[in-house]
Amino acid sequence: MHEMNLNAAGASDTAECADKLFEQHRQEISRNTDRLIGKLMVFQWVGGILIAFYVSPLAWAGQSSQLHIHVWAAIVLGGAISIFPFWLTRVWPGATMNRYVISVAQMLMSVLLIALTGGRIETHFHVFGSLVILSFYRDWRVLIPATIVVGLDHFLRGIYLPYSVYGVLTASPLRSLEHAGWVIFEDIFLVISCLRSVHEMRAIAQRTAALREAKIEADRANHAKSEFLSRMSHELRTPLNAIIGFGQLIERQNPTESVQAKAGHIIGGGRHLLNLINEVLDISRLETGNLPLSLEPVCVAEALEEALSLMRPLAAERNIELFPPDPMDRSHYCMADRQRVKQVLLNVLANAVKYTPRDGKVTVSVSSNITDTIRIFITDSGPGLAPEKLTRLFTAFDRLGAEHTAVEGTGLGLALCQRLMHAMQGSIGVNSVVDRGSTFWIELARVESPLERMVSAKRFESSTASDARKLKIIYVEDNLSNLTLVEQILADQPHIELISAMQGLLGIELARKHSPDLILLDLNLPDLDGWDVLSRLQRDGVTREIPVVIISADATAGQIKRLMTAGARAYITKPIDVYEFLKVIDQISASHLTNAPVAV
């Protein structure tokens, strides 16, 4: 019953919207027709005066040309007929009254012009043309007063002044009926045209209203999808934080090869799941335009070296040779987001390696023949693709039959690559021949090599042990697994002292008491929201200058931007990558004195 009520309410809203659109369209037509006929009335007035000067003397007085009373009739009567309707169209354009006033005035102008020409048959066509112009209102009712006016005029003048209407001295009453019949004949088709036009207008309004409603529903569904993805991302990242984090700790702390191999499987599985989450989130962000990009000059050789180094273990496992560009030219720079272009390269390389048979090869080359772009080619010796499949290659979730093979994947990788390339003002494409392999190409805008390079801050692992002062860090986190993970990550860092708090208020008190060098803050706390904790730390005179790093499973761009604006120095998303976590700790400490923001 509730669903039926909702459907009825939705249908009512659509019908109401359609009625409003229909009325708006009809009102717009009325205003435009008012303006058109208003100008026509003035033009006819001037035309009537010219006819009175040059045609009426000949029509009414033979060959003797003289100033006739018709001139004064054209000036006075034409002005009386034309000026009032013209004024109405300028003062109240689109008013319902206007169309009926104009209907009568237009027919009176036809009457005047017929009289001025001495009833010439050619001038009678003005009546039929006027009826067509009046039908522009799409309102068949305006034809009624127009038809009455012209019918009465022809009947009365046909009796008393037949020469003024028919150009003869005597006329049969049947002639007036004949003229009226032809006018009614035209009216019938004009009425049909008006009714059809109104029906089409209403159908268009209904379709437009339905499309608007569908767009609203689509936007609502898209917003719900984004909210769902955000929540699911948070819920999935929290357990993954413990899985990947503890897996990395086991890998780092246990020298046994068998244990390290098992830890590697745990980490690999966790990262695979994390990659799937990130791909879905990235697709969603790109669709809504919320994916943050930082375009900068990127060395093509460095990006390729990073991607190839990460891809070599997978290639070695499948006994596939990777051939980098030879030579690796370090003068080629492109404008791109450093992390995103590496993500695209990894996706394309992984795709090439996975679909190339064992003992095959994958070759990478770079072309800079075009002065303003750089194109990277990745060629494999795989099975290739038929031409009809190439158009579906960059469609999300379409794996082109790969779901029936041993190749893993979701069908999102290449679709994400295409959207990322477009977001970076680049392009991606493929050329493929069945049984001869495929060549993917990535094209980006070429830029000059930057004069200065950003140098990464020195990591704590390489810092001198002679530094007697320990780095004091407070971690505010209510999840015991996450708290234990960070404690064990920092356990082998003798120069770091970690103080933990599982509530927001306790974290604030500890910050006031110990004046730490760094505060790590989770957002979901049992007593205070992380936003409130950050706000109080910023207001507190004692802790105002202490850098705060947010650690949260919420990876949405808007959340990150708002927190950075609110005063956070950096934002680490769960699950925590141990090496990236230590790097951020290092960077924060190195930039503590400069109070500079840190990009993670």
Image (cartoon, grey):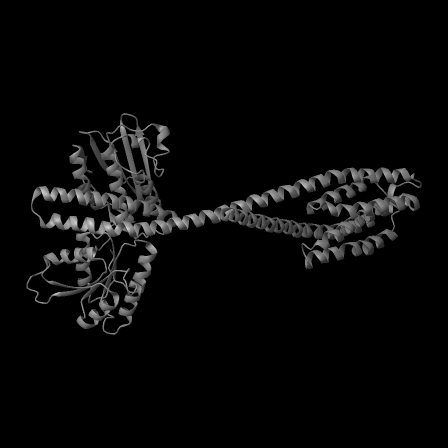
The residue lying toward the viewer, choosing from 541 and 249, is 249
Image: 79 above or below 302: below
**Residue 50 seen in this snapshot:** no
**Residue 403 seen in this snapshot:** yes
Relative side of 268 to 70, left or right? left
- Identify the residue at horizontal 33%, vertical 51% (top origin): 230
The total number of labels drawn is: 0
Relative side of 464 to 555, left or right? left
Q: Whole-percent x and y of residue 290?
A: 36, 52
- Identify the residue at horizontal 62%, vertical 41% (top origin): 200
Tell me the quadrant of the picture where the C terminus can be found. bottom left
Name of the residue lying farthest toward the top: 435
Relative side of 223 to 421, left or right? right
Q: Whole-percent x and y of residue 29?
A: 65, 49
Name of the residue lying farthest toward the left: 466
Q: Whole-percent x and y of residue 394?
A: 34, 37
The residue lying toward the viewer, choosing from 381 and 500, is 500
Name of the residue lying farthest toward the bottom: 541
Q: Whole-percent x and y of residue 282?
A: 32, 47
- Identify the residue at horizontal 48%, vertical 49% (top origin): 216
Picture quadrant of residue 566: bottom left
- Identify the residue at horizontal 15%, vertical 49% (top origin): 248
Image: 461 above or below 431: below
